[in-house]
Amino acid sequence: MSMRRLVWLSIWLFCGINAVYSQILYPEVMESKLPLLKPLEVPAIVFPADLSACKKGLKNSFITNPAVRYAIEELKQEKTKDQELKEALEVLIHYAEDEQVRPVVEAVKKYMQDAAKKEDALQRAIRQIENDSTAYYDAHAQEYQDDSTLLYYNSNLRTLVSHIRNDSSYTWLREISKDSVQVHLSNRADQYLDVWMNNGRQDYYRFWVINRSGDSIGTWVQVLPEKNNLRVYVDDDVYQNRGVDYKKVPEELIKNQLGEDFYKISDPHTGELWRRHWNFYSEMEAALGQGYQSNWASGGENSLSLLTNLRLYLNYNKNKTSWENFIHYRLGFLRSGSEDIRKNEDRLEFNSKLGQNAFKHWYYTAQLNILTQVFNSYEYPSDSEKKLVANFMSPGYYTLSIGIDYKPSENFSLYLSPIAGKWTWMRDTTGIDPTRYGVDAGKKSKGDAGARVELRNKFPLAKIMEIRNELIMFSSYYNSKQSFTGDWKVQIDFKINYFMRASVYANLVYDENYSDKLQFKETLNLGVNFRF
């Protein structure tokens, strides 16, 4: 026997002996052992019975359209530099997120639909109180023979009626439910009658109906207390031989019933939103004064005066850039007694201001200002002939400055300029003395540099008054003798009606180039005002 077979025989014997031996030692079947690790138990997923409870935790859940909710959240995150658009979005978003609007509107609509019923119920209760009181008074007439005061019976009903009639909410809702429908009646002669319905009371109106032949028929139009009901009556003395067969006319009242769609809010019309960056407007005033005397014992002179005031504005505003331009011209004439007409007011001013927003209401600003007169100006000494003292651009004042401007509103501006150049130019040095305006003899211009402060504001007072205030100051850095000029103008307008107004104008000037004394001018005018 080979060695290989001997090995295989040994293995089979060993296995067989082990199997027999194990059956002898453990003849019963071995029990199955449970594994040490238990299988994973997954709890059952339970959905809430009412999904609306989960929806309450969402923002604006009362808005059914999810696209609208998403748009609102996106608009809140967007940052816009347009302040007006930002304020408009805040108002619209606040309205869209107010879930109390719909219930309030539904409640008001329901009240208005039942307004006539409430008014009828109130009137019925009042009549019941009067009837009960009358019956009570008749039954106790002996007790009230000497007493003119009628004590109302049924105090509980009286208390309820008094509460409803004096309730401010009931009064307000009753008023807005009235006069909501207007009926316009017209005849062939273009005569018309406007009748208000739904006013809670019974009214009669006289109206004439005209046929093709021109014959008129008198009618009465009755507005019934019931909602949207009219009744038309023909005068009793009218007889009709042909026309409508009244037997075929239904007996129902003429009614304008409002359907359910009347109270539905229609979808808003969306259009293109754009903003006008250029703005132009103008103001014109004209005032005339006149006085006449003939053989007046206390003396005096005839007088005539005319004052015109013209303002032109052209402004540009886009993003952070603003450009303001205006032209202001005042021209006035005066004639007193036998003297010739004299000019007493001539001022032409042009101002252009370019600004770039720095922060909040502050702007980096560059400004150009030109001031002069148009016609010849004279002095009238008592002992000599008139003397020419000024004409167009003689003098002419030019000011170019750079600074910062504070503008919290369109009616207020405070301009501070540490760098300002000022030039005085004399176009005519032959007929006008240039030294009168600080220009050296033999020269046509004078330059200076300094600081400029300018305040312009306008505000209403007591509803019928409007005050315009303007203060301009300039201080020179180089010329110590002629270092300061100030120009303060105040105009108070008293509004009489849309076109007429009275105004008081005062101008205070201090110019060291001309004199160390204050210059003052005041005028009182009554005239017309136009704005375009």
Image: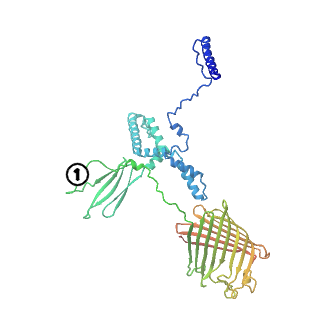
The amino acid type, in three-letter code, at marker 1 is Tyr
In the rendering, at what x and y percent does residue 289 appear? 57, 76
Can you say whether 22 is above or below 62 in the image?
Answer: above
In the rendering, at what x and y percent does residue 107 appear? 46, 44
Circle 1: element type = helix
Can you say whether 241 is above or below 426 in the image?
Answer: above
Q: Quadrant of residue 529?
A: bottom right
Please state which of residues 353 and 476 is positioned toward the viewer in this rendering: 353
Can you say whether 116 is above or below 42 in the image?
Answer: below
Query: In the rendered image, is residue 514 in sight?
Result: no
Q: Residue furthest left?
A: 241
Q: Residue furthest front?
A: 1
Can you say whether 177 is above or below 6 in the image?
Answer: below
Please state which of residues 150 and 201 is positioned toward the viewer in this rendering: 201
In the rendering, at what x and y percent does residue 358 appear? 68, 62
In the rendering, at what x and y percent does residue 466 appear? 60, 65
Please state which of residues 61 and 334 is positioned toward the viewer in this rendering: 61
> Does 205 sit left or right of 30 as displayed?
left
Total marks in image: 1
Query: In the rendered image, is residue 235 in sight?
Result: yes
Q: Residue furthest right?
A: 480
Mark 1 closeness class: few <14, some 14–19, many ≥20 residues within 10 Å:
few
Q: Which residue is mark 1?
A: 246
Q: Quadrant of residue 190?
A: bottom left
Please state which of residues 16 and 55 is positioned toward the viewer in this rendering: 16
> Does 185 sit left or right of 375 as displayed?
left
